[in-house]
Amino acid sequence: MREELAGFTIGVTADRRRDELAALLQRRGARVVLAPALRIVPLADDTDLREATRACLERPPDVLMANTGIGMRGWLEAAEGWGLAEPLRGVLSRSYVVARGPKATGAIRAAGLREHWSPASESCDEVVEHLVRRGVAGQVVALQLHGERQPECTEALESAGATVIEVPVYRWAPPTDPAPLHRLIDLVAGRMVDAVTFTSAPAAEALLRAAGDRTETVLAALRGDVLAGCVGAVTAEPLVRRGVPVSAPNRARLGALVRTIVDELPRRTVTVKAGGHLLTLRGHAAVVDGELRPLAPAPMAVLRALAAAPGKVLSRTALLRTLPRGADEHAVEMAVARLRVGLDAPRVVQTVVKRGYRLRVD
């Protein structure tokens, strides 16, 4: 198959660039579930942003810590609206400018400013360590926030003797419609998606927060059957802290994240020989002798259970436990029948009279 992700279902929790990420995944054959965990709310008319801007004009910062491209652009656009853009650019042009990543670097250059240093890891912690080593005692540091306060960064700089001006350009807010996020949580808890992508640490926190009393169930799924794909190490931190193994590219780019998923997901598939056929199980499909066979959730659940113990007879009661609540043994028979039709390989699943079903591996 040419589409490396055909048969896989992948959740996308991003908001601002969700369509771009979804298109990259769909181009490779994936089924995508869009479920923004957060949305960005600009603060162009916010009193705190205006006060932080005036503070920078009154006490020109010795250091500017630019965290995000969208944040720097939003700050300068807001300043333009207040008639303060040129004075702000003037004071920032004399600052030692640290850009946390390429997007912040691009925004800095687009504003006619020049960055002096960027961390290899794109990590706030590495930026703070660099500034503390360089020396910030007695200096003013303008810290452009990314969505929420970063008290650990502010406290570390203040402990080193700096005065920190926090610049809140935007904030994270819950999605306007929370239903898609709760649907994705259902799918993760039921292990009915193969991967979930995260492009920011707050989005990972938001998904777990929205899971409520199912948080541990979601974490268990992410520690096992559901791949957590993160755009970078900073995004991954909330999940890593909770013991979730994550896959992340070395460089924080959407394209690199997709390549990481393309490399990782096919390696996690189960392949068995049964009834004279080679079967590879993907999220919502089986690949039978190289041909993709999409399956409904119930037949797919039965196939997964049978493939987990090739040749072993599983009773209707055992298979019933793999189906949604409320199903009965008749539903098992229907799922098996639909599975046989869907695979278009009738010898794969064998009925063992009065005992149940098994994959025919002899």
Image (spheres, helix red, strand yellow):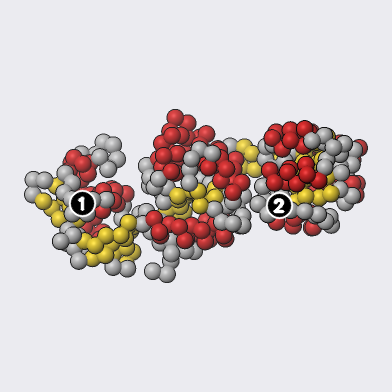
Residue at 42 percent across and 69 percent down: it is: 2
Left of 138 or right of it: where is 49? left
- Residue under label 2, please give it: 119
Q: Give the label, 2 or 1, closer to the camera.
A: 2
Q: Which residue is mark 1?
A: 336
Q: Residue at x 27, y 50 (%)?
A: 308
The kind of residue on which mark 1 rests is Val
Name which residue type carries label 2: Pro
Q: In front: 193, or 248? A: 248
Q: Residue at x 59, y 57 (%)?
A: 250
Q: In the rendered view, would you say 231 is above or below 37?
A: below
Element carrying mark 1: helix
Side of 294 where 195 appears, left or right = right
- The mark found on residue 255 in the picture is none
> Where residue 310 appears, x then y in whole percent?
22, 54
Residue extending furthest top? 213
Q: Where is residue 348? Give x, y as percent.
A: 19, 60
